[in-house]
Image (cartoon, grey):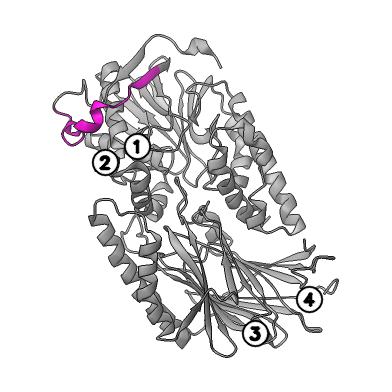
């Protein structure tokens, strides 16, 4: 077990920032995918007993989705280079833990990126993580919303441009757990607060012998698929659309993401620390708010 | 538990039977009504009635009747506390009400957003009741309603889901409000995020009966869909209410107060303690939720169904302390 070295709280500022071209492209993908899924849902509602998605219907959505995300590039399945893990049943639909592992033996130079997909969600492309060169990220955990029975997929792109996929099927939560914000007032009141935890490598452990970082950002990460009860207008989506974590000028991890990432986005990953410089984080949400902070790299054990 | 509170009549209704041909429910649901279980409404204090839900998940077999429901009858009108987990249950409730009082059901009070408490709303709206809820209830239903309707089709079955609508409250309570039933006033209180972020309690001053909704669970494991810290923090204020008896959201329909809070207080302490320790040690969420709170397993019904989910929500919250 890695020992926790410490925690620092910060609050982000709020300056304007331009929306990137890549973001516009992603919005288009997300919107296209959403229409696909909505069409599927409407068909389900009109059918007699087709409320729940199955592996087959999840796969069907993926088949129509993958071209939008990856074009006609071949995707290698189950090579062992990438592995995704999630609980077989989502306990809390709003907070489903997901782990992605990269096998260093099969990707000695690391991977360029990992794309996380949840087939049946309104926004199936949960996130694309860009991994810095020699950042040493081999394990990444986050938390996602899962709306229905669905495959969760991780597609890793190697330095050579190959795509490798791993998938796991997650059953939706039973009972009244919905993929929605639990405490909306609190989420809005504390929005932008950031926390970085640093974990030293555990002594004597064979696996996981790299230090870890955990980035936490307070944000409702709202879907925008709800109407305002008073005005009946749809509430605009409001979520963290990207962040980057660097040490000095060296990128460790960057993300472009959407509403399938749980409220209070949370990312934990191992990394290969360089000498010296502090850890810097910059995150942007869909209202153009920028949250920035930096923390000293805690020397002990690193 | 004071058994002397259970006096007089035990009123039994059947879905649609006794409700007369005017009840629209009889048309589409005859098949279900035929094998419907008794809907037992017990008078727990003068003019105060309660239905006891089963400690189960909502299923076709129990017709969604898993939470406690209430009825308070004044000189002029009656108020219902929660509408039940299906229209079939709500209509059986309405039939049972007509057996105990000719007064109109003027108010339906929703204690919070969950399907077992609100899926029967349309039946009460259709008999002219005004739906009352916490000021956050419309927002919560807007965010979840479509999911509930879709998700419960497989759990309750198409037949029971037929006609169920998400009916938001027409009248909102931001802090406190009073509703007069004629010679009897109900005191409603909106709480900060706890079980959910839209919890409402109902206090009948005439008998000192407190309907807590799911702010109090007994027997049935509490479920967390709001804020564990908020729930713990507000339990003292809840306990300070000078009630003679409490009707919890789940469990017995009349219990001593504030002793009724003891079991859930202990569960929350164990759960929060286990999770705080894991967070301090750097153990990740996925691993922690498998063990946190386990020592409480034998004290609760539905522990395996809900504990891991509670632990997940609690971990995500306590990580920010």
Q: Is residue B36 magenta?
A: yes
| Badge 4 and badge 2 both on one subunit | no
Q: Which residues are magenta?
A: B22-42
Q: Which residue is mark 1?
A: B60
| Badge 3 and badge 4 both on one subunit | yes
Tag 2, which secondary structure? helix
Image depth: mark 3 or mark 1 in front: 1
Dot label at residue B159: 2
Q: Residue at x 56, y 61 (%)?
A: A86
| Badge 3 and badge 1 both on one subunit | no
Q: Earlier in the sequence, mark 2 or mark 1?
A: 1
- Chain ID, mark 3: A
- Chain ID, mark 2: B
Q: Which residue is mark 3?
A: A132
Tag 1, which secondary structure? loop
Dot label at residue A297: 4
Distance (Cα) linking label 3 and label 2: 54 Å
Distance (Cα) linking label 2 and label 1: 9 Å
């Amino acid at each position: 077990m890695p020992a926790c070295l410490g925690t620092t709280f910060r609050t982000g500022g709020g300056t304007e920032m331009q929306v990137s071209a890549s973001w516009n492209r992603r919005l288009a993908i997300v919107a296209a995918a959403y229409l696909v899924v909505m069409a599927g849902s409407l068909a389900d509602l009109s059918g007699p007993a087709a409320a729940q998605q199955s592996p087959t219907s999840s796969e069907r959505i993926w088949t129509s989705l993958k071209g939008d995300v990856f074009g006609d590039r071949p995707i290698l399945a189950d090579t062992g280079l990438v592995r995704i893990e999630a609980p077989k049943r989502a306990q809390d639909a709003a907070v489903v833990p997901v782990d992605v592992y990269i096998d260093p033996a099969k990707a000695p130079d690391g991977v360029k990126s990992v794309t996380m997909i949840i087939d049946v969600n309104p926004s199936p492309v949960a996130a694309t993580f860009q991994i810095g060169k020699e950042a040493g990220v081999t394990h990444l955990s986050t938390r996602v919303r899962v709306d229905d029975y669905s495959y969760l997929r991780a597609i890793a792109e190697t330095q050579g441009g190959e795509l490798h996929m791993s998938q796991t099927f997650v059953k939706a939560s039973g009972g009244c757990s919905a993929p929605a914000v639990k405490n909306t007032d609190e989420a809005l009141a504390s929005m932008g607060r950031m926390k970085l935890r640093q974990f030293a490598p555990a002594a004597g452990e064979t696996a996981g012998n790299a230090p870890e970082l955990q980035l936490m950002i307070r944000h409702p990460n709202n879907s925008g698929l709800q109407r305002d009860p008073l005005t009946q207008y749809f509430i605009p989506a409001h979520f963290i659309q990207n962040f980057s974590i660097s040490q000095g000028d060296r990128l460790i991890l960057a993300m472009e993401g959407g509403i399938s990432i749980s409220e209070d986005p949370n990312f934990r990953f191992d990394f290969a620390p360089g000498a010296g410089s502090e850890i810097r984080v910059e995150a942007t949400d869909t209202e153009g708010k920028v949250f920035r902070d930096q923390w000293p790299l805690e020397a002990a054990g690193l | 538990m004071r058994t002397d509170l259970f006096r007089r009549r035990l009123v039994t209704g059947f879905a649609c039977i006794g409700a007369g041909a005017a009840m629209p429910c009889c048309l589409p649901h005859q098949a279900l009504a035929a094998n419907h279980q008794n809907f037992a409404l017990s008078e727990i204090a003068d003019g105060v009635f309660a239905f006891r839900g089963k400690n189960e998940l909502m299923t076709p077999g129990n017709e969604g009747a898993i939470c406690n429901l209430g009825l308070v009858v004044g000189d002029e009108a009656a108020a219902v506390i929660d509408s039940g987990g299906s229209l079939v249950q709500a209509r059986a409730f309405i039939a049972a009400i007509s057996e105990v009082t000719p007064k109109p059901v003027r108010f339906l009070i929703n204690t919070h957003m969950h399907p077992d408490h609100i899926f029967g709303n349309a039946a009460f709206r259709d008999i002219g009741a005004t739906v009352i809820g916490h000021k956050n209830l419309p927002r919560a239903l807007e965010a979840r309603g479509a999911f509930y309707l879709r998700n419960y089709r497989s759990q309750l079955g198409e037949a029971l889901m037929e006609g169920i609508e998400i009916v938001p409250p027409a009248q909102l309570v931001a802090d406190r409000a009073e509703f007069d039933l004629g010679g009897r006033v109900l005191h409603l209180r909106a709480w900060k995020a706890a079980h959910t972020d839209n919890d409402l309690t109902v206090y009948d001053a005439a008998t000192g009966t407190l309907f807590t909704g799911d702010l109090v669970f007994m027997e049935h494991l509490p479920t967390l869909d709001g804020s564990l810290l908020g729930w713990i923090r507000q339990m003292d204020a809840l306990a300070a209410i000078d009630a003679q008896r409490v009707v919890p959201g789940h469990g017995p329909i009349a219990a001593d107060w504030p002793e009724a809070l003891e079991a859930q207080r202990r569960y929350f302490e164990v759960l929060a303690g286990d999770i705080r320790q894991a967070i301090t040690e750097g153990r990740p969420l996925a691993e922690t939720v498998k063990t946190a709170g386990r020592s409480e397993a034998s004290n609760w019904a539905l522990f395996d169904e809900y504990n891991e989910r509670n632990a997940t929500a609690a971990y995500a919250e306590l990580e920010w302390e």
